[in-house]
């Protein structure tokens, strides 16, 4: 633990935070709870729901949830955030901005802050084309202003026209998980409890049910599956009613389980219990897929998609699972069929997946690299 009095001051900010479930929010929380040992760390985000600003302590870290009027184009409308940012950043030696989150870019510009700026670049803005017309100049200003840009893989840089001019500022630090969180705990069986046929193989998807996750492609692929299996969607989103209706129309509703939002302990039990994990993402908004690590550390093979982002660099085709073209339902069906019918191959990939996480994605190693950047100790 660094000297309490002389510790540097760190502000971590992004769109949302615990209890919101998502990859960016997971990385923010991991960073905040690790960095509190070495810096006076605070977190600023926006409320998930409408309401006034609230302040809480989460995992020992002070968190301010700025009041919000709701969201437009997946971005919170929060005037409170701008004021909170200015007050907090002026007391910080370093600010880390988790993007994409245009309100944070604007807040930094308006604040006049002169200290160290680190950008954690999770993905490009992909779908909000109209917003991008106005946002792009601000984004470029921020990237010029940044002292360092954290990216999870080299593919983040290579696939982003925005990052390529700032390649020299980019530092590759993968995302990570703590394997101990998935070990030595009583595993329940939340998936088996839902099965209609106890002998069926269990296919798991976790994440928001939104356009870029490819849940619709997974549903179509599952409908053509010959193997006895049942499919579990753990997560909620705007597409949930549409997906449920499609499952009904395909005549597979009884074998498809929409579990809604589940908390972390139960999700970990699901990863431990499933036979196969599928991440069928179809757009570059999926830049890494931390959920792949959660499946892999449990010794589960992963089927992912060949996006030009970091997704296929996490679980490797033919080593820890299979990679298929995005939006290709037939290829996804074939990949699921192959792994579900070959127990030896499924076990081989699963063992290799766990070994890869322990070797490459241990949270302790990842956080040490992050600390060196945030505290300017490269």
Image (cartoon, rainbow, N blue to C red):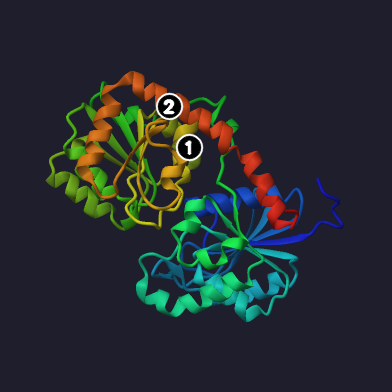
Residue 169 seen in render = yes
Residue drawn at the location 28% of the way across and 55% of the way down: 239
In depth, the one of 152 and 154 nearer the eye is: 154
Q: Give the CA separation, mark 2 to mark 1.
A: 12 Å
The structure residue drawn at horizontal position 53% and vertical position 68%, both measured from the top left corner, is: 165
Residue 81 visible: no
Give whichever of 18, 38 is nearer the camera.
Answer: 38
Secondary-structure class at tag 2: helix
Q: Which residue is mark 1?
A: 294
Q: Quadrant of residue 319?
A: top left
The tag earlier along the polypeptide, 2 or 1, is: 1
Residue 79 x %, y %: 54, 77
Q: Is residue 154 left or right of residue 111?
A: left
Q: Residues within 10 Å of mark 1 (few under 14, many from 20)?
A: many
Above-or-below relation of 206 to 151: above
- The picture places residue 287, in percent across and down from the top left corner, at 44, 53
Reading the image, the residue beneath label 2 is: 350
Mark 1 falls on what kind of element? Answer: helix
* Residue placed most toward the observer, 286 or 208: 286
In the rendered image, the vertical position of residue 97 relative to residue 37, given as above or below: below
Total number of numbered discs in the rendering? 2
Residue sitting at x 57%, y 66%: 166
Left or right: where 135 falls relative to 28: left
């Amino acid at each position: 633990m660094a000297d309490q009095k002389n510790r540097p001051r760190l502000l971590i900010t992004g769109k949302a935070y615990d209890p919101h479930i998502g990859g960016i929010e997971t990385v923010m929380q991991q960073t905040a709870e690790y960095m509190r040992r070495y810096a006076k760390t605070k977190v600023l985000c926006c409320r998930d729901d409408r309401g006034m600003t609230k302040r809480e302590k989460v995992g020992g870290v002070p968190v301010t949830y700025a009041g919000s009027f709701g969201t437009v184009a997946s971005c919170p409308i929060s005037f409170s955030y701008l004021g909170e940012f200015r007050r907090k950043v002026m007391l910080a030696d370093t600010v880390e901005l988790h993007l994409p989150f245009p309100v944070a870019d604007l807040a930094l510009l308006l604040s006049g802050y002169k200290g160290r700026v680190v950008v954690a670049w999770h993905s490009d803005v992909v779908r909000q084309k109209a917003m991008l017309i106005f946002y792009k100049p601000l984004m470029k200003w921020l990237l010029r202003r940044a002292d360092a840009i954290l990216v999870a893989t080299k593919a983040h840089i290579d696939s982003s026209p925005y990052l390529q001019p700032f390649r020299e500022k980019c530092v590759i630090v993968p995302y990570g998980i703590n394997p101990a969180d998935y070990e030595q705990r009583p595993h329940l069986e939340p998936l088996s409890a839902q099965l209609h046929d106890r002998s069926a193989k269990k296919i798991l998807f976790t994440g928001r049910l939104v356009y870029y996750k490819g849940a619709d492609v997974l549903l179509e692929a599952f409908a053509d599956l010959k193997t006895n299996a049942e499919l579990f969607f753990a997560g909620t989103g705007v597409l949930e009613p549409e997906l449920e209706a499609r499952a009904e129309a395909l005549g597979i509703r009884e074998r498809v389980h929409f579990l809604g939002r589940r908390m972390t302990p139960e999700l970990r039990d699901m990863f431990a219990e499933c036979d196969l994990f599928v991440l069928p993402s179809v757009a570059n908004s999926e830049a890494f897929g931390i959920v792949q690590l959660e499946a892999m550390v449990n010794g589960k093979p992963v089927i992912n998609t060949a996006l030009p982002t970091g997704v296929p660099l996490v679980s490797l085709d033919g080593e820890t699972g299979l990679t298929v073209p995005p939006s290709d339902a037939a290829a996804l069906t074939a990949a699921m069929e192959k792994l579900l019918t070959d127990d030896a191959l499924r076990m081989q990939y699963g063992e290799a997946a766990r070994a890869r996480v322990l070797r490459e994605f241990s949270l302790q190693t990842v956080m040490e690299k992050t600390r060196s950047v945030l505290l300017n100790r490269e």
